[in-house]
Amino acid sequence: MKINRKTIVGSVGLALLLSSSAVLAADTEGQRGQLNSKDFKFVTDASRGGMEEVQLGQLAKQKAGSPAVKEFGERMITDHQKANDDLKQIAQKKGALIPNELSRHETSALDKLQNLSGAEFDKYYVSNMVRDHRKDVREFEKASQNLSDPDLKAFAEKTLPTLQEHLRMAENLESQVKGK
């Protein structure tokens, strides 16, 4: 059998990829405590999404031009901080570790909004809130049906009406700020 340099490099690369995947899988298992992978993914996504909503709400309080958008930002901080605290308690009870920082995707919205203010901020922020809450409502509807953990399922069911209200509020704001 003839072995060339490309075969060795390819084999080493594949071995590194497989071993790093195994390490990541083992690491995730250690972080998820008693939760299965689907329930843990929901916890991770919901936690990061909630953190993003709080941080974006704080920016809205500072940079929005419209008092209604500032008020909406305040509401996002209050509601999502409460949901984050509830989720954190459930995760801790199950021995799961939740993320304490945003993903690259979530920080990109923050970065974009950092550079805007006034009416321009309002339009981008509210548009982002409509899009984000539509996604959240779909995810929480699915979670309230499909999660295995009864505490997480109850959390999704309890939080869903608040997210639906946020979506209605954001859609109403969107028509207001687009008119300006």
Image (tube, helix red, strand yellow):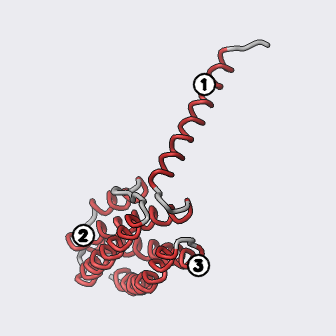
Spatial separation of the CA atoms under disc 2 and disc 1: 47 Å
The spot of residue 5 in percent (x, y) is 65, 15
Which residue type does callout 3 highlight?
Gln
Closer-to-camera residue (80/123): 80
Circle 3 residues within 10 Å: few <14, some 14–19, many ≥20:
few
Spatial separation of the CA atoms under disc 1 and disc 3: 43 Å
Residue at the spot 44% in from the left edge and 83% down from the top edge: 158
| SS under mark 3 | helix
Circle 1 residues within 10 Å: few <14, some 14–19, many ≥20:
few
Spatial separation of the CA atoms under disc 2 and disc 3: 32 Å
Up/down of 135 relative to 172, above or below? above
The spot of residue 20 in percent (x, y) is 53, 37
Q: Which residue is mark 3?
A: 145
Up/down of 177 relative to 105, above or below? below
| SS under mark 2 | helix
Closer-to-camera residue (105/117): 105
Which numbered disc covers residue 30? none
Return the disc, 1 or 3, that comes first in the chain's sequence: 1
Quadrant where the C terminus sits is bottom left
On the rendered structure, is 42 left or right of 91? right
Q: Nearer the viewer, mark 2 or mark 1?
A: 1
The spot of residue 125 in percent (x, y) is 35, 71
Q: Which residue is mark 2?
A: 58
| SS under mark 1 | helix
Q: Which residue is mark 1?
A: 12
Residue at the spot 65% in from the left edge and 19% down from the top edge: 8
Q: Nearer the viewer, mark 2 or mark 3?
A: 3
Which residue type does callout 2 highlight?
Gln
Which residue type does callout 1 highlight?
Val
Return the disc, 2 or 3, that comes first in the chain's sequence: 2
**Callouts 1 and 3 close, C-beta under 8 Å:** no
